[in-house]
Image (cartoon, rainbow, N blue to C red):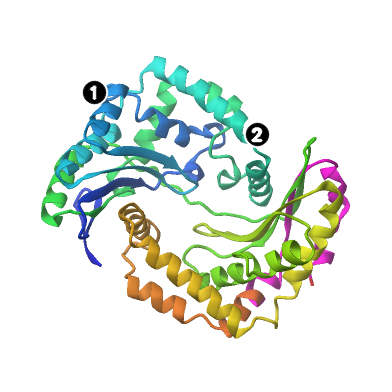
Amino acid sequence: MNVKYKVFDSGLTVIADKMDVQSSSIGVWINAGSAKEELNECGIAHMLEHMAFKGTLNRNAEQIAREIEDVGGDINAYTGKEVTAYYLKVLQEDSDLGIDILSDIIKNSVLPEEEIERERGVIISEIGQSYDTPDDRVFENFTSTAFIEQSIGRPILGTKETVGNFNKVDLQTFMNSHYGLENMVVSASGNINSDWFFDTVNEKFSNIKHKVKSSNLDIKWNSGFYGEDRDLEQIQLVFGIEGLSNIDIDRYSLRALAIILGGGMSSRLFQELREKRGLCYSIFAFTQMQPSSGVLGFYAGTSPKDGNELLEASLNEWNKLRGSISKEEVSRAKAQMRSGFIMGQESTSSRAEYLAKNILTFGKLISNDAVLKEIESITINSIEEVLTKIFTSAEPVLSIIGPDASFYKKINLNTLLN
């Protein structure tokens, strides 16, 4: 990678990743996701992300969209548990415009009252849509149980009650408390001249006066069950235990383990539960990694009459992992991880995000060679060590949505794990 980065005296980190293409992906990643919210702020990071596009001192909402689309570019944003990101993609000759718009919405948003009311309705509709999507909501219920009464466990969208109460002062206070330059990474991948990019970004962003509110996110995992009785055609099910943090030395081996368990059509869960038993259409394992905790789990959807059999059969595959990992499975998992990483590096937007998150997570850039070396170092032994590490004192969480979901509450999950 032809990557350079610089940390300015203001605390702002800027990354320039030169690629032989005609376009540039440029974004701002801010260490201010929903995990930084107080209880009464649930959903405010997401609402602020929406409001950033609703007008600045220099542009109204239509002008922000029109200026980018007039040059054939696109602009978007997202709010996660850890970060809020604002990003765009433009042709090389329009990079200056892209930087100007990004800096404008970060430092000059006016948060107009009429737009707040309009966007409040949009987000409340989005919350309702989430409720109507059970295969999304079952994950939300899982997270709220595993991290009960913690910001990391609350919904990114917020609730109808909290979103209904936010006002301009609330939004401005959150921005002033979290959108400081030392909490921010501006990253670009594509046809970028690094010296020009550093100078331009520093000029455009340097007068941002927002601060950074200190916070210590100490995550605590909790075992439990969440059942939501709904009149649905299928039962949606998520089961998991505490995994590893996103800086844990064994995180690559854990990802390989998730692939072996339920990553793709050749995985154990897919072969046993779908191909051999025909109990489901969709089933997969997953990992989530946060600064001080994480998740290893699996999801499946099945008919209500097959729910109990699916859960028991899935946990049987889960329990069979220890002492049974094969060289072929490890090789297949490593190949999937390697190809996924390399293919991601061919996308300007993926690279810009990857580099920004390197800084936010590790405080430095991790080279491609270093990542590929970590993947190559995965062995049967390293996966077995992860299994011992997280399975020994596993505290399970089960989330189910569907007919008679409360039936599963009586199951002693610990007895199903050996």
User: Disc 2 residue type?
Assistant: Tyr
Q: Which residue is mark 2?
A: 131
Between 42 and 387, the one lying in front of the other is 387
Q: Residue at x 84, y 50 (%)?
A: 408
Quadrant of the image for the C terminus?
A: bottom right
10 Å neighbourhood of mark 2: few (<14), some, or many (≥20)? Answer: some
**How many labels, in total?**
2
Region rendered in magenta: 388-417
Q: Residue at x 30, y 22 (%)?
A: 62
Element carrying mark 2: helix
Q: Residue at x 39, y 16 (%)?
A: 113
Residue at the extreme top of the image, as rendered: 114
In the rendered view, tell whether residue 324 sits above or below residue 298.
below
Q: CA distance from mark 2 to mark 1?
A: 36 Å
Q: Which residue is mark 1?
A: 57
Q: Position of residue 320 (x, y in %)?
A: 75, 75
In the rendered view, tell whether residue 49 sits above or below residue 380.
above
Between 289 and 260, the one lying in front of the other is 260
Q: Position of residue 406 (x, y in %)?
A: 84, 44
Q: Seen in the image, is 137 located left or right of residue 244?
A: right
Q: Position of residue 214 (x, y in %)?
A: 41, 46
Q: Seen in the image, is 136 located left or right of residue 73?
A: right
User: Disc 1 residue type?
Assistant: Leu
Q: Earlier in the sequence, mark 2 or mark 1?
A: 1
Q: Seen in the image, is 137 located left or right of residue 175?
A: right
In the rendered view, tell whether residue 33 sits above or below residue 375.
above
Which label was assigned to residue 216? none
In the rendered view, tell whether residue 168 sits above or below residue 267.
above
Quadrant of the image for the N terminus?
A: bottom left
On whether residue 172 falls in the magenta region, the answer is: no
Q: Position of residue 264 (x, y in %)?
A: 60, 64
Q: Residue at x 87, y 47 (%)?
A: 407
